[in-house]
Image: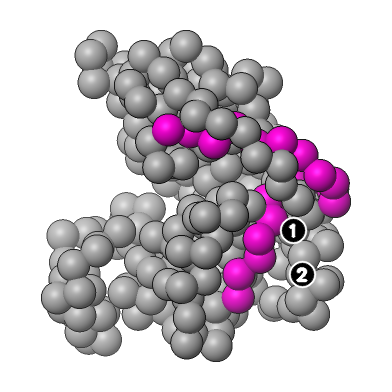
Amino acid sequence: MPENPMIERVQSLLHRFGLHLGRHRYTLEGARDAMLHSEVDLVIDVGAHVGEYGSSLRAAGYRGKILSFEPIAEHFEQLQARAGGDNAWRCLNRAGGARTETATINVSANEGHSSSLLEMTPTHEQAAPGSHRARTQSIEVISVDEALAEQSAQPHDAYLKADTQGYEHEVLAGASEALPRCRAVELELSLTPIYEGQLLLGEMIELMRSKGFRPTHLEPEFVDPQSGELLCVNGLFQPAARIGAANA
């Protein structure tokens, strides 16, 4: 996510003319940008942290609606500040999950980037020193479906992004009504367990297939710097019916 204001302005200008700096239309980012500029009326941003993802969408020229979920209090304050003045960007101080409930989240020491409702495994801690649990916090959880109803948001073509540190399958469990309206779903996927109880890459692909989505892009995200082992990828899934129609 570009943090430099000058970079953001340059990228926004390039996007106005359909140009992409350092990216290709067949990358995950390129595919996302193409959809956001022509087909999406709401981005559902689950696991927003302090708003990096939403800001990157705005820098890329997306001006549609964003609904961001962030449960950790101090991160939510920064998220709200970043979204301030943007009437199309709403923020919820909740985690995304399968149902409405109160839960305890493990807040990581690396500025919360590895915070999760699941316990971290030694594999993660060894690959990212300083990512250990610093404390816990009581939070509120809500399903995507319940949040959309609460916000009176009924998108025609949504884009769901879930970066929830191993909790993505629970987010999907709470989005059964929203998924049929999703043009695409972007997920963080693990090749090896880095959080206790998470579903791994193959299991998540099969889960998404059962919901009518096929993987179209997989890109490296988290590599163990010592061993070089790829631990996580970012995956983009699109409705199988739409892919089939496009290829017909």
Q: Which mark is residue 144?
A: 1
Residue 245 rendering spot, x and y as whole percentages: 59, 63
Answer whether residue 98 is magenta in the image: yes
Q: Find residue 24 and report its image quarter.
A: bottom left
Q: Which one is nearer the viewer's eye here, 90 or 233? A: 90
Residue in the foreground of this view, choosing between 230 and 164: 164
Q: Amino acid at mark 1?
A: Val
Apparent side of residue 154 relative to residue 196 in the rendered image (left or right): right
Q: Are marks 2 and 1 in contact (CB under 8 Å)?
A: yes
Residue 117 horizontal side relative to residue 108, left or right: right
The residue at 55%/84% (across/down) is: 88
| x 39%, y 60%: residue | 52
Q: Quadrant of residue 243?
A: bottom right
Q: Is residue 6 above or below residue 237?
A: below
Pointer 2 residue: 148
Q: Position of residue 3 (x, y in %)?
A: 24, 64
Residue 7 falls inside the magenta stretch: no
Q: Residues within 10 Å of mark 2 (few under 14, many from 20)?
A: some
Left or right, residue 107 beside residue 103: left
SS at mark 1 in the image: helix
Above-or-below relation of 134 to 111 = above
| Colour basis | one colour
Residue 144, horizontal then vertical, whole percent:
74, 58
Question: In the rendered structure, which amino acid carries the disc numbered 2?
Answer: Leu
Element class at badge 2: helix
Q: What span is colored magenta in the figure? A: 90-109
Taking depth in this image into account, of 11 and 76 the one nearest to the observer is 76
Q: Position of residue 113 (x, y in %)?
A: 43, 41
Q: Residue at x 60, y 69 (%)?
A: 91
Identify the residue at horizontal 45%, vertical 58% (top origin). Answer: 50
C-alpha separation, residue under disc 2 versus residue under disc 1: 6 Å
